[in-house]
Amino acid sequence: MKHTECKYYINLDCEKGMCGRTKKMVPIDGAGSEACPMFDQAPKCGVCGHFCNADKYGVGMCQGFKKENWAYAGCGAFGCEKFVMK
Amino acid sequence: MNVNEEKMQEVLKKRGIEAAMSEAERSQIAPPPEGVNKLMDIYYVLKNTVDMEIPYWYNRVWWENDGDIINIRRAKAFAAALSHATPNILPYEKLVMQKTKNVRGAFPFPWVTASFFNAQAEALMTEVDAPAESEADRVSIVGAGGGNVTESYGNIISIAKKFGMRKEDIPVLVKASEPWDGCSVEELSTKLAEYTPEYNLHKNLMDNVVCMFDSYAIPQGREVINYYYPLQYGWDGIIKICEKGIHDTMGEAGTDGILGMSRGYYYLATKIMAEGMSKWCSNYAKKAEQLASFETDPEIKKNYEEIAGVMAHIAHKPPETFRQALQLTLACHLAVVNEDPQSGQSIGRLGQVLQPFYEKDIEDKVSTDEEVLDLLQYYRIKITEIECFASAGVTGGVLSGNTFNNLSLGGLTKDGLSAVTPLEYLIVEAGMRTKTTQPTLSVLYDEKLPEDFLMKCANCTKLGMGYPAWMNNQDGIGFMMMNYRSEGMTLEDARAWCLGGCLESAPGCFMPLTYNGKVTWIPGGAGPTSGTGVHFIGIPKVLELVLNNGFDKRTGKQVLPAHNKKLDSMQAITDQWQAYLRKIIEVVNKVNNLQMDVWRKHNMPVVQSMLKPDCLVKGQHLGNMGTRYNATINYESCGTVTFINSLAAIGKLVFDEKKYTLDQLTDAMWHNFGFETAYDTQVFSPDFRKATAEAPKYERIFADCINAPKYGNADWEADKYLKWYEDVMFPMTREYHSYYGKELYMCQISVSTHGPQGFITLATPDGRLAGTTYSDGSMSAAAGTDKNGIYAIFESATVYDHSTQQNSQMNLKLHPSAVKGIQGTRKLLDIVRAYMRKGGFHVQFNVVDSKTLRAAQKKPENYRDLMVRVAGFTQYWCEIGKPIQDEVIYRTEYETV
């Protein structure tokens, strides 16, 4: 798992973030991007029980709302009222 | 402190002035709080980033509500976007909320402009499918460019040469953009514009960069926000106002058969948006609670808990402390700058708006001045983080990457007294302690302002960050009364004006804030954008087209219809210049009106329309003229002084002295006076000249052009053309009407367009070489041509009444030694005062040594925090394009004043 998937991850920019526990900058890609044993999954569409049929780009369907619609796995779901962890 | 300084200090102290600083005191400016330093350290290594969370949710809810009333549909979409955005809080922050999940974040608005993304869809997807580069290439491109992502690397794709977007977001961008093909604001208005009689001419003007800005690109901004309603009522209170509005007006047209029915829709849309704002704030409260739940550092944990408390409170109720009030204004500001691509969303007179909250906290001993100062420094970082995603031409060519969130100080109260508050002293102090590009500060100079406040502001200006800039309050009031009188503006409301964007005088009003057991009349914006319109017209380029019968030699195109006139007098030249300019304004204005009319009908602001008086009273959004004043749309010029100096050279050399024929002069111009062009040399500074074999042929005429009368020397032979120009432009702009049915007026700031518009202009009669930048602003002397000192420039600049136009702009560069010590501070204030007393509207200063700038140009990585004043804004040196860097370096540097 990667830092970016972790609920302790704080977004900074397109190439890095910060670990909310250690307060250290962590890269999104390459060496050092793998999460530590404290990893705890962040709410994202990709791990939501309502998300399915993702293609190779991570674009799938959201069935959580009255109207089914497309969604993408990397989208944050902290504020989503329908999010349920898979 | 030397003897003279000590004496000066004594004199000032006897007069009750204690804010002036000696050099020793200057070095004792308190450092920023530790948290601010940590956040700035993070900021300096951040990349500008675009992501798709907000566009995704906007898009999803918009299309799910297909067929709904547009205003309501837009509110549903934007409320969903904000309330689903991932809240992001950094450990050391005391004020929170961001435009997007990334700190320097922004996002595309395909509903405003989708053509670029749709045209590039295939190419973008190809980049996604390409294998990632080697590990070495994955690392960030550091050094020159600061946070700008000018090239793609690793899993990051450069968008608009400024932002990085992760590859995994590209398919989302492509998918979200597809439905907007043919129906974005850009494309709808373009389809309609094709029906205007001379659309091809418009296309010519844009393609040849005679005009360089489409209004839809940044349809909001260059205006002043208004925080009154949330501060007074909170989101729950606004929801109640809307519920009453719905009850009273839904299904009722009143006596207005066209817009009466819209009121019910407006109140419903505004209620939905207020609920979205509330949820957005609540999400931040929940996020802070979550962070606090696992935080082990007691200080950081306490901070998270405080943030959670503040955000939970302002998610519903009006603020009860200064911190809550400041946080709420930030929430409003970020929401507004997220509802459209925009720059120049000005904060307004925040120190007057929040004074009641500050005052009560101090009275109740809830806060100390130092704690308030800390918050104001954290605030500076939050505003500096605001980015605007637009095309490369707009972000780089116009904005230089800045978003111009201007904070005004001073001016007068509703009753005509000094409006300076104790909180404003702290705002200036915060700007001295924490040096960030935003918010830039502007002093509304008035003779009634306290001397110690002015001295404190002068002290701040001396520090070299470019702020505060100085504006003439009486000119501003005069302009307000003239321009908005027909809409019923009173002198009281005129006093509420301030700067929208960097320098756009914008209308305001005072609203009665009831707090702490009393009513305080607080100023805020009361009109829509004061900055979209006919933008930016390179007037030296228009002169070039006059001299070459409408043909652009650079592009080989007939841009304007050939006039075929014999240019045998100055009158003939200036008449044709006016004729061409009239045609340009006529054509561009029609297209601009269509762009903005489509915007207001399909993309009307929903947050801004909640905030701005009198939308909530009228029950009309901003597009339906819900605001109190609507004659805000302008015409904007670029290259004023290059044009004035060019007329002066033609007048003297061709018609007065008859030293050369016009053909001889233009022949020299078309041959760049025998020098290589900036296109070849890639050096844009006016002082760089590389001779060609033809140089001797043009040596004499070039010298005569250089030595012809120049604006900025109190020389009537040049200044008379400025007087003529301003007198001509005042009535000319008022011949045209905006989409609000109101007359246009003239705005005279170049922002950064003097770079690109200089680039497309061949050599000019004043001796400026092809491709080099125009003179900056509108009142600055062309670099290196002001020989008679600062007061001579003031004489030249004030040959006309500055209150007849929206603004004017003068940049001055002072060597730090010129304003050294307390006597230097006094001198600086004297300079400002002298110009203001003569009626000048605006002056701003770069207090910097040109050697430092040259060194920074060579090794930008060593100067990451160096800031300069460009046009109406301060920007990090390393994030400015080279042509503008060259221009700033070459500006005349005054070593004595």
Image (spheres, coloured by chain):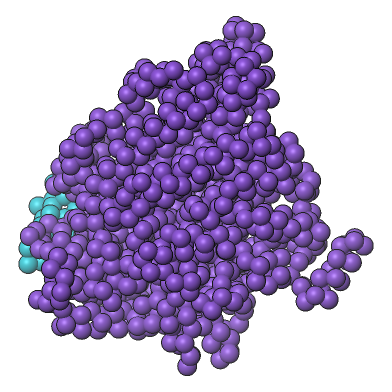
Determine whether, in the image, residue B134 is placed left or right of residue B5.
left
Determine whether, in the image, residue A32 is placed left or right of residue B874.
left
Foreground residue among B667 and B131: B667
User: Which of the 4 image quadrants contains residue B192?
Assistant: top left
Q: Measured from the top left, where is residue B550 in percent x and y?
A: 38, 22
Foreground residue among B746 and B425: B746
Name the residue furthest bottom: B517
The residue that appears at 44% across and 75% down in the rendered structure is B510
Foreground residue among B387 and B497: B497
Quadrant housing the N terminus of chain B: bottom right
Q: Measured from the top left, where is residue B32 in percent x and y?
A: 62, 65
User: Which of the 4 image quadrants contains residue B580?
Assistant: top left
Q: Measured from the top left, where is residue B788 in percent x and y?
A: 75, 39
The chain coloured cyan carries which letter? A
Q: Measured from the top left, where is residue B109 in percent x and y?
A: 27, 50
The residue that appears at 70% across and 40% down in the rendered structure is B714
User: Which of the 4 image quadrants contains residue B417?
Assistant: bottom right
Decide: is B84 above or below A3.
below
The residue that appears at 20% across and 80% down in the rendered structure is B245
Foreground residue among B834 and B96: B834
Res. B506 in view: no
Decide: is B319 above or below B427.
below
Q: Colour of chain B?
A: purple
Determine whether, in the image, residue B285 is placed left or right of residue B761.
left
Res. B816 in view: yes
